[in-house]
Every structure is written in structure tokens, then in C-alpha cells.
Image (cartoon, helix red, strand yellow):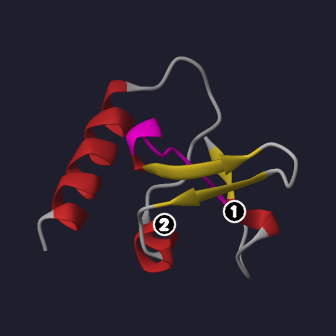
Amino acid sequence: MVDTGNWMQWSKKVILAVDWLESISYVKQEISVGLSANIIREAPEFPDRHPLEPNFEKALYDFYDKAFHE
């Protein structure tokens, strides 16, 4: 889960797969991801409840599958 509030003009929490992380700087507290800002902006917002609801998980898979195949 990533909170975009520190690096985007809008703030929301999204789930990103660790496979998409390109680099991590613990010193700078930064990550680089292999996704465009637009994809992250359009991603479903993390509902902040545990465990994830099956409907949200399906919507998440569907969104990222579509985003990567456009």
C-alpha cells in the first residue's frame, strides 16, 4: 500500500505489486515504480480494511490487467 499524498497533488492510498518497484531508498524514504502517474492516479483507492474484500481484489486485478495491456 502506498499513500500518494507526499508526491502527487492528490492524496490516496493504492496497492502496488512489489514487482513494479524499480528502486528503494531507505535513506531518502523514496521508491521508484515502473508505472505512470496516470495509472496510479486512476487506480482503485485502497479501502483500508483488512482483509481485502473479494470484490475489491477483483477490481484491482481487472484495473491493472487493463492498464498493462492498453
Residue 50 x %, y %: 59, 20
Is there CB contact under 8 Å for labels 2 and 1? Answer: yes
Residue 49 x %, y %: 62, 27
Which region is colored magenta?
12-19
Mark 1 residue crowding within 10 angstroms, few (<14) / some (14–19) / many (20+): some
Residue 36 x %, y %: 43, 74
Residue annotated with mark 2: 40
Q: Residue at x 39, y 40 (%)?
A: 19
Position of the C terminus, as image quadrant, is: bottom left
Position of the N terminus, as image quadrant, is: top right
The image's mark for residue 52 is none
Left/right of residue 58 with respect to residue 29 in the rendered view: left
Left/right of residue 69 with respect to residue 60 in the rendered view: left
- Residue nearer the viewer, 70 or 57: 70
Residue 46 x %, y %: 56, 45
Farthest right residue? Answer: 27
The amino acid sitting under disc 2 is: Ile
Residue annotated with mark 1: 4
Distance of label 2 from label 1 (alpha carbons): 9 Å
Q: Residue at x 58, y 60 (%)?
A: 32
- Residue nearer the viewer, 17 or 44: 17
- Label 2 sits on a secondary structure element that is helix
Sequence-first disc among 2 and 1: 1
The amino acid sitting under disc 1 is: Thr
Left/right of residue 6 with respect to residue 19 in the rendered view: right
Q: Residue at x 38, y 38 (%)?
A: 56
- Label 1 sits on a secondary structure element that is helix
Mark 2 residue crowding within 10 angstroms, few (<14) / some (14–19) / many (20+): many
Q: Is residue 49 placed above or below 69 in the rendered structure? A: above
